[in-house]
Amino acid sequence: MERPMETGTHCGGLAGLVGRAEDLVRRLATPSLVQLALRLALAVPFWRSGVLKWDGFLQLNEIAVTLFTDEFMLHLPGGPYPFPAPMLTAFLAGCGEIVLPVLLVLGLGTRFAALGLLLMTAVVQLTVPEGWPIHLTWAAMALAVMAGGAGRISLDALVSRR
């Protein structure tokens, strides 16, 4: 003969399990870990784009120059307009897409790097207006990093402790 289940035992076990899971998530999702994840998530698309622009140290490839000369246009009122000084713009974009993500990942000059990527995101939005859903995500991540700083898992935190 089966024993009847005690009232609330099953629910108490489930509530305890949920409580332990919430506690684990709370311990894992520390503000510093969240800031690190934001920094990494924001850095990756810019880094990947930047790597594609170079053939060697400070040597832009032809594709990057061609994009800024012939393909990319700024979608402003009355436009679209070509990029001014396309060679210089391509060079600066390529440098920014390498240097700023590295700074973000290291957590060095983090708010400055996030601001730089926010400004680059604005230019990308003007260049590719239909990409607004992903650009909005990048902007939100940059703003979150700017507001919250690098967190404890960063060179900024190490420098400030000394």
Image (cartoon, helix red, strand yellow):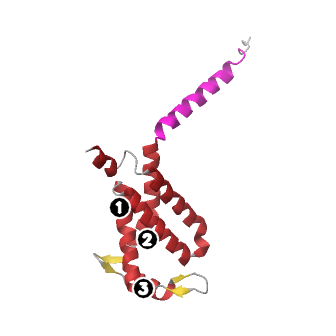
Disc on the earlier residue, 2 or 1: 2
At 35% from the left and 72% from the top, the residue drawn is: 95
Earlier sequence position, callout 3 versus callout 2: 2
Pointer 2 with pointer 1, Cβ within 8 A: no
Task: Report the amino acid beneath label 1.
Answer: Val
Q: Nearer the viewer, mark 3 or mark 2?
A: 3
The residue positioned 59% from the left and 86% from the top of the image is: 79
Q: Residue at x 57, y 63 (%)?
A: 136
138 or 60: nearer the viewer: 138
Q: Secondary structure at mark 1?
A: helix
- In terms of sequence position, does the residue under pointer 1 or pointer 3 come before the other? 3
What residue range appears in magenta?
6-30
Nearest the viewer among 85 and 29 is 85
Where, quadrant-wise, is the N terminus in this rendering? Answer: top right
| Rendered residue at 50%/34% (across/down) | 24
Residue 121 shown left or right of residue 95 in the figure: right
Q: Secondary structure at mark 3?
A: helix
Q: Label 2 crowding class (10 Å Cα cut-off): few <14, some 14-19, many 20+? A: some
Look at the image and tell me whether residue 53 can be seen. Answer: no
Question: In the rendered view of the protein, which quadrant contains the C terminus?
Answer: top left
CB under 8 Å between discs 1 and 3: no
Is residue 104 something that shows in the picture?
yes
Question: Which label is found at residue 102?
Answer: 1
x%, y% of residue 99? 34, 66
What's the magenta bit mostly, secondary-structure-wise? helix
Kind of residue at badge 3: Pro
> Disc 2 designates what residue?
49
Q: Quadrant of residue 108?
A: bottom left
Contact, mark 3 vs mark 2 (Cβ under 8 Å): no
To which residue does mark 3 refer?
Answer: 86
